Each structure stands twice: as C-alpha cells, then as structure tokens.
Image (spheres, rainbow, N blue to C red):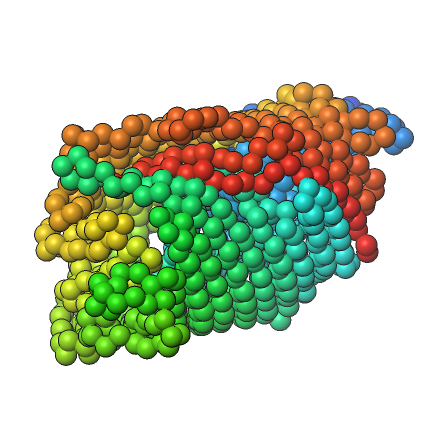
Amino acid sequence: MSKKIKILVFIIVIFTCNIQAQITIKGNIVDNQKEPYAGISVLLKTLPDSTIASYAFTDGNGNYAISYEGETKKLNISIAGLHIIPQSKDIENIGQEINFTIEEKEIKLKEVVIKSTKIWGSKDTVNYLVSEFSNKNDIVIADVLKKLPGVNVSESGAITYQGEPINNFYIENLDMLGGHYGIATNNISARDVSTIQILENHQPIKALDGIKISNSAAINLKLKDEAKGYLNIMAQLGIGGFPWIWDNELSGMYFAKKKQNISTYQGNNSGRELSRGLASFTASDKFGVDNVLNIIVPSPPSINQNRFLFNNSNALTINNLYKTGENSQLNFNTIYLNDHEIRRSKSLTSYFLTNDSILIINEDMNLSRNIDKLEAEVRYNLNDSSNYINNFFYIQGLWTNNLGDIINEQEIEQRLKYPTFLFTNTFDWVKKKDGGNKGFEFSSSTGFKSSPQSLTIRPGLYEDIFNNGKKYSALKQKAKINNFYIDNNLTFLSSLWLGDISVNPKLGFGLESKNLNSDIYITDNNHKTFALEPDSLKNRLDWTRYYGSTALSLIYHKSKIHIDALLPISYNSLAIKDKILGENNDLNRVFFQPSLNIKYQLTGNTSLYGSYFFYNNLGDINTLYSGYILQNYRSINHFSNQLAESRGNGGNIEMTYKNVIDMLFISGGVTYNYTKRDILFGQIFQGILTLTSALEQDNTSTNLSVNGRISKGFYLMGIVTSLDASYGTYSSEQLRQKKLVQFKNNGLNINGSLNAKPASWLSFAYKGTWSRNWSRIEAVETFTPIRIFINNISCDVNLPKDITLTANYEHYYNSAAIGNRYLSFTDLALQYSWQTLFLSLSWANIFNTNNYISAYNNNLNSYYQNYEIRGSDILLKIRMKIK
C-alpha cells in the first residue's frame, strides 16, 4: 500500500470515529400550510431518565440543528412553543432528519391554568418544584425538604440524599452559611422558594472538577423573584400556659446578586432546642475528645425532644456574604447561644459482672445545665476553573456549668464547670494551568484548643482513698488539656501519566502537641481547701507527635468509571513525657495506609460506589495518664503510660438508582470495619465505685452493617413514601473485673413514612420505626431482646374561612420497660393563614402524660429509667411578615 493510500485510510478512520462520537439531528418545522415556523423550542433528551442533552430554536426558515455526544441508545426529541400543541418522538442515537408539522391551539388568557412538573432532571441536577410538595401549613423550607423523595432530614436537622450527607448548601448558588445550613432551612419561608435543586456528584472546587470525583450531593435553593433584592422581616410571638411558656422569633433576610444576609433571634422555653439548628453538619473535628471529667446525668429518652426538654433558650445569629468579584466572596458569620436545661429521672443501671453476678445501682437524678456559646467565622473564597483560594478562620468560646443532684443511699451534689476556647485557620489553594489539569493543590491548617475543667462533689466521698479515712466536706478534681496542631499537604496535579492513569505525588508534614495537668483537692470541715500531695493523684503529661508523609495519588477516569487510589507512607515520631514519674518515652512508627475509591456509572440512572482503606492509630493522651483522676462521683480512672496502638481496615459498597420522571430513588449498601488493639481497657467495680483497668493483650472488634432505602413519589394524591432498613452486627473482646469476655450485639431497624393529600381539604402524614436489639456474652449470658415500636400520625383538615385543623398522635412501645410498656401523646392545633399572617393555637399532650419509662442495652450494661416529660400545655403563635 502506497504512502498516500495509507494517509487517506487514516483520515477516513479518524473522520469515521468523529462521526460516531458526535451526531447531528436536523430538521424543518412547518405549519399545516407548509409555512416555516420560527422561534420553536427543540429539546433533545436522553432516555429513560429524560435528562436534557441539548436544545435549539428554529430559524426564520423553520430549520434547526442539534449536536449530541454520548452513548445513550435511545433519545427523545420534542418541540414546544406558544400557541402550539407540544409534540415528541423517540429516536435512535444516529444522525438523521426529523421534521414536524405543528398544530396551533387557541389560548384564552382568562381561563388558562399553568401547571409545572413536580420534579425534573438535567445531567447531575434534580429539581423539585416547591409548590407541588408543600401546603399552606408549611412555614419554613425545612417543612418541605422532609417531603421530597430521595431526601431525608434527621431529627438533628442534617440532610441526606440517597443516604449520603450533603456536602454544601447554597442559596441562589452562593454558600453563605457553610455547614450551619439549619439557619436557612429553619428560617427561610417556604413561600419564598420556587425550586429546590439537588446537585449530584457535586465537586465544590471548580479547579478540581473532573480530577476529583465526588459521591456527595449539594442543595441549592432557587428563590422567587419577589424574595430577591428586598429586605424580608419575619416576626413570631408565642405565648401560652400550663405552665407559662413562650416561643418568639425575629428574622431579617436579604438576597441579592452581590450580597446576602440572614440575621435571626430565637427564644423559647417550650421544649424546642435551638442548638440543633445552629450546628455545623459539615465541619470536621481534629481535636478529638478532651473532656476527662463528667457528671452522672439523666440520659434523654428516645422520644421527640419537644416532649421532654425543659429549657429556657435564646440564640442570635448574624450571617453576611459579599460578592467581591465574579468568582469570589467574603463571609462573616456570628452565632451566640444561651441554653438552660433541666432534667429529672429515676434510673436503674445493671452492670453484668463475671460469674453471673450483677451490680445494680438505683439513682434519682436531677440536672441543671447552663451553656453559653459564642462562635465567629470569617471566610474568603475564590473559585474559578483554574484558581481556587479558600481561607477559613473560626473562633469559639464555650462556657458550660452543670449542677447535678443524685440520691443514691445519700444525697450527692455534683458541679462541673467546663469552659473551652478554640480557634482554627484553614488555607486551601488549588492552581491549575488554563486548559489543562496540571497544577498543584496546597492546604494548611492550624488549631489551638484549651479545655480547663473542674468537678466538685459534696459531701466528700471515699475518705479511705483520699484522706486516710478522715471526713471532709467536699472533693474537687481539676484538669486541663491544651491541644495544638499544624497540618500541611501539597499535591502535584497530573504531573505524570502512565497510560490513562494520572499520577499525582503528594507530600505532607505537621505536628500535634497536647498536655494534661490535673490535681485533686479536698475541703475540710473548716471550709479550707488544699491540694492532695501524693504524686499518684496528680498528672503532668506532655504528648507530642511529628509526622511526615509522601504519597502517590493514582486517578483513572473514563466516561463511566472513575478509580482513585492513594498510596501513602508516613513517618511518625512520638514523644511522651510524664513529669510526675520522671519518664520519657519515645517511639517511631512507619505506616502504610492505602485507600481505594471506585465509582462506576452502570447506566444513566444507576451508580455503583465502593471504597476500601487501611488505618493506624497511635492512641491519645486520654488513655496515657498514670495519676488518678476522679471522672465522676463513682468513677476513678488512671492508666499506664504505655501507648494504646490500634490498626484496622474497612470499606463499603453502595448502589444507587434514580428515575426522576417516576420520582423513584433506591439505594443500598454494605459497610465493614475491623480494628485490632494491643491494650484492652475495662472496669473493676468496688461497690458503686468504678476503677479503670488495662490489660496488655491483643484484642479485636468487628462491625458489619447492611442498609437499604427506597423513596417513591406519586402524582396521584401527592403521595410520597419512603422505607429504609438496616441490620448491624458488632462483636468485641471486653474486660470486666479483670476477666476477658466476648460481647456480641445485633440490631435491626426499619423506618417508613408516608405523605399524601387524598383531597384538596385533607393532608395526611405517617412515620413509623420498628427496631430490635439483642446481645449476648460468650453465648452464656444473653440479654433479653429489646423491641421498640414508634408510630406518628398527623393530618391537616382545611376548614372554611382559611382555617386548618391539625391532629397529631404519637405512640411508643418498649418491650423491656417495667410496668406500662406503652406511651402515647395526642395534640391538636388550629391554624389560620391570610396573606403574610399566620396564626396557630396548639394544645400539646392533651391527656397530660408526664412520665416515660424506657430500657436499653449498651455493651455489658443495661439501663432502665423513668424520665419526667413535659405535661399538657397550650401555645398561641402569631407569625407575620413585617416588611
């Protein structure tokens, strides 16, 4: 074959490949008289998910042309426009000519009713039309989010989509609140939002789009035009009785293209916890646990929080966003919370010891807790396709004061003061060459946290341990943990290619520094306080870790599959200094902790995701101190200065399916985790006093869980239903009374919900939970299985004069409760809405149920409690838009 013929064949092959990769569909649109029709909208959609792939408009001659690149076998082409009847045709994925002859229709403007689709999708975006999922009694957008198929809002306010937590929350494509999105969902009026968008596989950093694939979704609220560019002020006044209660709110909101603001005040003593709506659902905590002291308090029961919370709370937030450029913004966020809470319960705790013996502790508990919390955030963000800069500064002050009274053969007063101060600063920079993927990613974070804490017990206990048998009036434990860290990482993007695999080298280094100081004091009968001198009752401990790491990030990405592997090797140098014992321990470790993530797009509707990882842990300062610490009135802890190292591996596989047109969302998966430790911690009981013990022995724990979720919406009667189930099994070796026991636990949970509007005057909602938990010790001692069944039914009946009657019924069953295993609540409310005014009169807990009896198992212990809950009360709320 001559050289010219070879070149010609090569050109033909290339041309043929391009033709196969991209097709063109063209055609002509005319009316019944064969006259061309201009300005007609032509949409090309992929099947079966009806995702919009491309669009065009006819020119003056009625001609159009649409190009498409993709592998979908079936397509749908449709036309629409004013005064014409819409048409559509299913076609093959080949270049072809499709012509239409339109039919005109007459529109009577006085009688026309325009209805929008409830849910639709395009590429990785799912859109929910708010007006189709809400009713007039939905006040804030959180009320609507709870009804969307595929979306779940937990009791804490955290939002998940297809079972995975969202990674960002936007308002008009701007992130004003970061992880504190509960401020938006609990304050933005449902009437001000036109569309809720789910942004699937959302990569918030544009410069990493296509390089790092995300498996998480984000939410974006599209506001109505009348809610943008204007200051909206909403006020609520709530007053009631039996006893005196109140629930007040004031919020101001402003949303424009270059500025956003949400400022809120909330205050109540009606049982509505404000801290949930202020929490950050996306923040990560690098400090770990630092509360070595606590008090014995009533554990909240597993019922709706507004049934048992006796509170007096006030919260203020100020949140501002300023657009400083086309792709940059500056955020200022401030949160203040004052929260006072009271709890009362009677509890019975059973500790299963060896030789079939059981230690039972009866306690009458009262808790008075006061929290003051102040947070401030400043964030600058530049986000374009080649350059990303994000600097986030966060500062927090937290003052906790707990007073707990215990009656256990004698009356004991516990007081815990726990002030905390912390700040963090995180800087992220991604720089990429224009038109390519080469560049670098750099991140640096710094943080400091100081946690002084003091516990006072009256009267003085354990005289034989602390004061040679002599009586004293009070016992005080003081402790303080300081924590400082620096973490830096640099990744070179796409610096090397091995075939289709991108190799990205990564370097990291940093340090962690912690110190723990503690002392025990007694107050004698002459009210003189002094520190106890024995070294065994003191701690002066320093813990410092330096680390450096190098890694290779391997990325393989094709149209349907994405594989991301990380191969890191880290060097860890740890220095532990116990100043009381005069001991210095140094150790060095090299860890190899690879991880693998795979995402495979099986079809346009179905995705498969899997991950696996290995990890090592060098323990923490909380399990290293050798001096005794009085953790609470009946627990004393101390450890050896030997490090408790652990290592393990884990992974998960998850599959998701969605059909936007049918409003069907299905997901399910399996999660596995295995951990091996070289130190086993346990408890030794001396009467009600618990001492911590440690055993140098390898021990393991295994956790396996299976879960599945299905959510389906119906156009009939506005039905949205969901069902999710999970089964988990956990096994571990535990130490009790210096003896090794094997503990196993199994749990099964099933949750279901249904929302429907069978008539224009009736709305109905149901939510139910069934769970079964059973445990055993070495196949000898078996705990009685505990079954819990919870039902919640509510309905809204629209009466004349814009009045709505709401009835709510909650029912709880606990098989392990002693005596009455059933508990129920009944509520009634009347609502009246007119334009921007909303009135409600509610009567909660009509039959004045004021105690809840429950039981549950936890490791080698079982708990039974009789918890005091809120009685009957009546509350009148007036909510209105002031401006």
Which residue is farthest right?
110
- Give whichever of 341, 583 is nearer the camera: 341
Residue 222 place in picture, x, y as percent: 66, 48
Q: Name the residue at the left extreme.
A: 697
- Look at the image and tell me in which quarter the C terminus lies: bottom right
Name the residue located 47 percent from the left edge and 50 percent from the top edge.
366
Quarter where residue 589 is shown: bottom left
Residue 129 at least partly seen: no
Q: Which residue is found at the position 57% from the left and 33% from the top?
A: 849
Q: Along the line of sight, which residue is nearer the eye, 737 or 836? A: 737
Please, is residue 833 above or below residue 103 in the view? below
- Image coordinates of residue 775 in percent, x first then y, are 26, 33
**Residue 295 horizontal side relative to residue 344, left or right:** left
Eyeballing the image, is 805 above or below 644? above
Asked whether, in this view, residue 641 is left or right of residue 139, the answer is: left
Residue 11, percent across and down?
A: 38, 47
Quarter of image, res 809: top right
Residue at the (53%, 60%) spot, across then down: 370
Looking at the image, which residue is at 15% across and 40% down?
Answer: 354
Q: Is residue 678 left or right of residue 147?
A: left
